[in-house]
Every structure is written in structure tokens, then in C-alpha cells.
Image: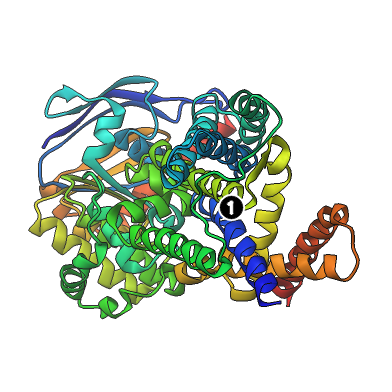
């Protein structure tokens, strides 16, 4: 039972990385980004193929994160250079990534049983390892926001007119934010692959919805009126969201019903927030 | 730094007449120029041309007799309007806003911005308004007047040699207006800034300006230098205002 609980927690933690990937562009740059649909499976595919050929599993995580960042860079450039809407740019990159993932893997799925992986058999060790990665990522992001660079980064999302007036390069910080956010998505895909020891090109489908649902749940519970709360929200939201899903399956829903459930959760959260604001 | 406008004109396709026409103006270094004129006379447009936000339809804007690209000129000039939503960020603290202004022309580093707290608190305290105690509060929690005070502080301490002030005190109560105007004038003198101030307050124009320009229908119609300004009163200026208004009305009726 405790093992089952820990596995649920671990999945929540990994999902929270994608929620961070969605939150950073959305909340700090005012740039709604769907690229996680591409960066998550790209990270997974790259990590799987590297581990399959016996590369170091930790190095594979880093390379996967880098590949995710590259997907973010492409979305940013499409938006900035071609002036294409951010959502559409993300969809275009997602379409590209499907073909690329198939090229990387050579087929639509790959199993990496018996390879050298970051995880041992103990789910507690796995749990600690992921907590460590998460703390490292969130704490360094928090410290970054307290620097001069971080201040200019925040200004881009809060007031674009102000940013222009004060010589802040919107392009530079948009690229930075999208690369960082999607590096986290790539990392998340890579971790989940090493945990499941299996990759499928379709595994990223709908991940952005799960990430947004987590983010919104977290923000509804904690609020997002301070940087600390904003940074805690994806984590708390993802953990809760994962438990809700687990509970739904436990109470008899089919796993194919989960997307409907997710959509209902998102709409409910939005409706609740609207109602709160009206009062 | 000498600012010079040569035969500057501005017109928009959608407007019927020109917004500005044949503006010739030379502002000496350290001069405080007050610009008055009724609504629609082209005061704000003139500011926007100088700051590089608008591009003039004809003529030249020169700094030290050199024509300088809009974008570069923009970095040399600080332009403050009454619109605090552009000049400050509501969701950031006072400190964060001021730091952004301070590091405007520098490459941002990985140093934390809290290091500036002490210096900024000191500088704010010199305004004698007690505003320094709000330094770690969010900008949106301040009143409009306090926010404009911070925006003025940011503009005047931004190390620019030319300052454009566009009705920067107009949204404030009379007492705050006075404090802010005194502070503005003090800093402009101290830092030997070249300043152009658009105002509807005629007594402010007379009291603080070294020189007063009156704009009407996009043209400079009066230019009082310091000696002719000495004989000027608010009533005389008001009479002039009416004179130009009446001329326009008569011309429209004919």
C-alpha cells in the first residue's frame, strides 16, 4: 500500500516538472505555450534510445533536457520571427516532433528493460532522487528570479510596454523562458521513460492538458499573488491532480475516461475562480 | 547637450490637418522649458517626436547638431507621462521598479538586486515625502500620487541628460502636485538636466520654466525667454490663450 502511495507521489512529482514547463512561459512571460506536447515525447525518445545503446543514464537525462530546450527555442523563433501566434507555433512544433520522434526511435515504441538506468528497484530511493531534482530546479529558478536578469525576465511578462521602454529584449527573455520550460518537459519525459522502461511515440498526447490542470489546481489552492506561491503551485497541484486521477481509477472509471475527467476539472476550477472574483 | 528641431512637421493619414508644422526650436543645455497650449495643440506629439516614439513627417531632430537615429535618441532621453501603467509595473515592488530603471542600459547580471536596497532607500528619503518606507511594497498598493512620485523619481534619476515631462503632475492633488513640482525643479537644477515640460498649470510654467513656449494648432505662437517671462503673469497668459482660441473660432465661422 505504501509502495502504491509512493508511486502515485512519484508520478505527481514527474508531472509537476511539465507543469513548471507550462507555468514558466505562461505566468512569467505571458506566453501560453503548448510545446510540452513536443518536448516531453522528444525528451522521452532521446533518453530511451541513448539508454538503449548503453549511454550513461544521467547524461541521457541532460541530453533529453537539452532536446526539450531546442523544441522550445523553435517555438520561440517561430513566434518572434514569423509573428505566428504562440499557441499555433506550439502546435506546429508538436506536429514536427511526431515525425522526429519516429526517426529517433526507428519504430513507434521501444523497451529498455535490463538497461543501466537511474532508478533502482526501491521506490523510496527513486522518490528521493526525484525530490532532489525538483528542489534543485525550483530553488535555482527562485534564486534566478531574485537576480537582475530575473527581474528583467519578469518585467517582460508583466508589462511589455514598460519592457520596451526600458530596453529589455523581449526576444531574448522569451527564448530563455521557453528553453528553460521545455528543458523541464524534456527532462520529465526522460525520467518517466526510465521509470516505465518503455517509450511510445504517442505518450505525450494531451500532456499539456494534465500540466495545465495541475497548475490551475495548485493556483486555486495556494493563490499566485507572490513568487513563492507561484513556484509552489505546480508542485502542489500536480500531486493533488495525480491523486484525483488515482482515486478516479480506483473508484471504477476506465483510464480512457481520464481526459474527460481532466477537462471537467479544468472547467470547474476556472468556474470556481471566476465566481470568487465576482464576490 | 543642445537639442534642436529644424522645420519639424507631423501629419497622420487619418487626421485632416497637420498635427505639427514647421517647428523650429533650439533648447540650450540645462534649460527648463515649459510648454503650454490648449488640448490638441500638438504638445504631446512634439514630445513623442523628440523622444523618438513618433517619426516626424518632415524636418530634423538634432542633438549637438547631429541627426541621431530614433532608437538611439530614445536611449538618451527619459520621457515621463501621466500614464503610470507604462512608466511603472504594478505587480512589482517599488524597489524592483527602480532597479529596472537603474539597470536600463546595463547588461543584467546574476547579482541579486537586493544589493541596491540601501542606496535606493537613501535616494528616496531625499524627496522628503516619507515614500521610502514603501520600498518593499507592491507598486499597485500605492496611491496614484505615490506611484507618480516614484515614476518621477525614476525618470529624474535615470542619468539621462534630456528629460521630457508630459503633464506628470496632473493626476495629483494640489499639495502633492506642489511637492512633486518642487522636487522636479530641484533635481533638474542639481543635475543640470535639459528639461521640457508640458503643463496646463500656467503658474507652474511661469514659476519653474526658464522659458515658456505656447503651441497653437501645431505651431509655436509665443516664445518667452527669461527676460520677457519676468513680466508675464497668469492673467496675461490666459488672455493670450483666449486670443488664439477666438481667432480659430472666427476662422471656422467665416
Residue visible at 38% across and 26% down?
A: B55
Q: Identify which residue is drawn at 35% across, 36% down.
A: B46
Position of residue B154 measured from the top left corner of the image (x, y, whole percent) = 27, 58
Categorize mark 1 by other alpha carbons within 10 Å: few (<14), some (14-19), many (20+). many
Res B234 visible: no
Name the image quarter holding residue B200.
bottom left
Disc count in the image?
A: 1
Residue in front for this viewpoint, A82 or B77? A82
The residue under label 1 is A18
Q: Position of residue A195 (x, y in %)?
A: 60, 53
Q: Is residue B25 visible?
A: yes
Is B177 or A122 nearer to us in this picture?
Answer: A122
Q: Residue furthest top?
A: B58
Residue at x-position 39% and y-position 31% = B54
Q: Measured from the top left, where is residue B97 in percent x and y?
A: 33, 60
Give the side of residue B34 with respect to residue A178, left or right.
left
Image quarter where the N terminus of chain A lies is bottom right
Q: Secondary structure at mark 1?
A: helix
Q: Residue furthest front?
A: A114
From the viewer's side, name the closer residue of A161 and B198: A161
Amino acid at each position: 500500500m505504501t509502495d502504491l502511495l509512493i508511486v502515485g507521489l512519484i508520478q505527481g512529482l514527474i508531472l509537476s516538472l511539465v507543469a513548471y514547463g507550462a507555468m514558466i512561459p505562461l505566468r512569467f512571460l505571458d506566453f501560453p505555450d503548448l510545446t510540452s506536447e513536443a518536448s516531453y515525447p522528444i525528451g522521452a525518445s532521446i533518453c530511451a534510445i541513448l539508454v538503449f545503446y548503453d549511454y550513461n543514464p544521467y547524461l541521457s537525462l541532460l541530453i533529453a533536457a537539452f532536446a526539450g530546450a531546442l523544441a522550445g527555442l523553435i517555438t520561440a523563433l517561430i513566434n518572434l520571427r514569423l509573428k505566428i501566434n504562440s499557441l499555433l507555433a506550439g502546435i506546429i512544433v508538436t506536429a514536427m516532433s511526431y515525425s522526429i520522434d519516429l526517426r529517433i526511435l526507428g519504430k513507434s515504441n521501444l523497451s529498455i528493460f535490463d538497461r543501466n538506468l537511474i532508478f533502482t528497484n526501491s521506490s523510496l530511493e527513486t522518490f528521493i532522487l526525484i525530490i532532489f531534482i525538483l528542489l534543485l530546479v525550483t530553488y535555482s529558478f527562485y534564486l534566478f528570479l531574485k537576480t537582475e536578469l530575473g527581474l528583467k525576465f519578469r518585467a517582460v511578462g508583466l508589462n511589455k510596454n514598460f519592457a520596451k521602454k526600458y530596453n529589455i529584449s523581449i526576444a531574448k527573455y522569451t527564448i530563455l523562458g521557453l528553453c528553460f520550460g521545455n528543458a523541464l518537459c524534456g527532462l520529465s519525459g526522460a525520467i518517466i521513460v526510465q521509470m516505465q522502461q518503455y517509450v511510445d511515440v504517442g505518450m505525450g498526447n494531451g500532456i499539456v492538458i494534465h500540466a495545465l490542470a495541475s497548475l490551475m489546481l495548485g493556483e486555486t489552492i495556494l493563490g499566485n499573488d507572490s513568487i513563492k506561491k507561484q513556484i509552489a503551485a505546480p508542485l502542489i497541484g500536480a500531486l493533488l491532480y495525480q491523486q484525483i486521477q488515482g482515486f478516479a481509477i480506483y473508484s471504477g472509471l476506465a483510464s480512457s475516461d481520464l481526459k474527460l475527467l481532466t477537462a471537467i476539472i479544468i472547467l470547474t476550477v476556472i468556474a470556481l475562480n471566476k465566481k470568487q472574483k465576482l464576490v | 547637450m543642445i537639442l534642436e528641431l529644424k522645420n519639424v512637421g507631423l501629419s497622420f493619414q487619418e487626421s485632416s490637418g497637420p498635427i505639427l508644422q514647421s517647428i523650429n526650436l533650439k533648447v540650450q543645455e540645462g534649460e527648463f522649458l515649459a510648454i503650454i497650449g490648449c488640448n490638441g495643440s500638438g504638445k504631446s506629439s512634439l514630445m513623442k517626436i523628440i523622444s523618438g516614439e513618433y517619426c516626424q513627417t518632415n524636418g530634423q531632430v538634432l542633438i549637438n547638431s547631429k541627426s541621431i537615429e530614433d532608437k538611439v535618441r530614445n536611449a538618451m532621453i527619459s520621457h515621463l507621462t501621466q500614464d503610470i501603467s507604462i512608466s511603472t509595473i504594478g505587480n512589482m515592488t517599488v524597489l524592483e521598479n527602480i532597479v529596472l530603471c537603474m539597470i536600463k542600459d546595463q547588461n543584467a547580471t546574476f547579482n541579486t538586486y537586493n544589493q541596491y536596497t540601501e542606496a535606493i532607500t537613501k535616494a528616496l528619503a531625499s524627496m522628503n515625502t516619507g515614500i521610502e518606507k514603501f520600498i518593499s511594497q507592491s507598486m499597485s498598493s500605492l496611491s496614484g500620487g505615490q506611484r507618480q512620485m516614484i515614476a518621477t523619481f525614476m525618470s529624474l534619476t535615470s542619468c539621462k541628460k534630456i528629460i521630457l515631462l508630459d503633464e506628470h503632475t496632473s493626476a495629483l492633488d494640489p499639495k502633492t502636485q506642489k511637492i512633486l513640482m518642487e522636487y522636479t525643479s530641484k533635481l533638474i537644477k542639481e543635475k543640470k538636466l535639459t528639461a521640457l515640460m508640458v503643463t496646463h498649470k500656467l503658474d507652474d510654467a511661469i514659476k519653474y520654466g526658464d522659458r515658456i513656449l505656447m503651441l497653437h494648432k501645431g505651431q509655436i505662437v509665443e516664445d518667452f525667454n527669461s527676460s520677457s517671462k519676468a513680466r508675464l503673469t497668469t492673467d496675461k497668459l490666459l488672455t493670450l490663450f483666449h486670443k488664439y482660441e477666438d481667432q480659430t473660432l472666427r476662422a471656422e465661422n467665416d
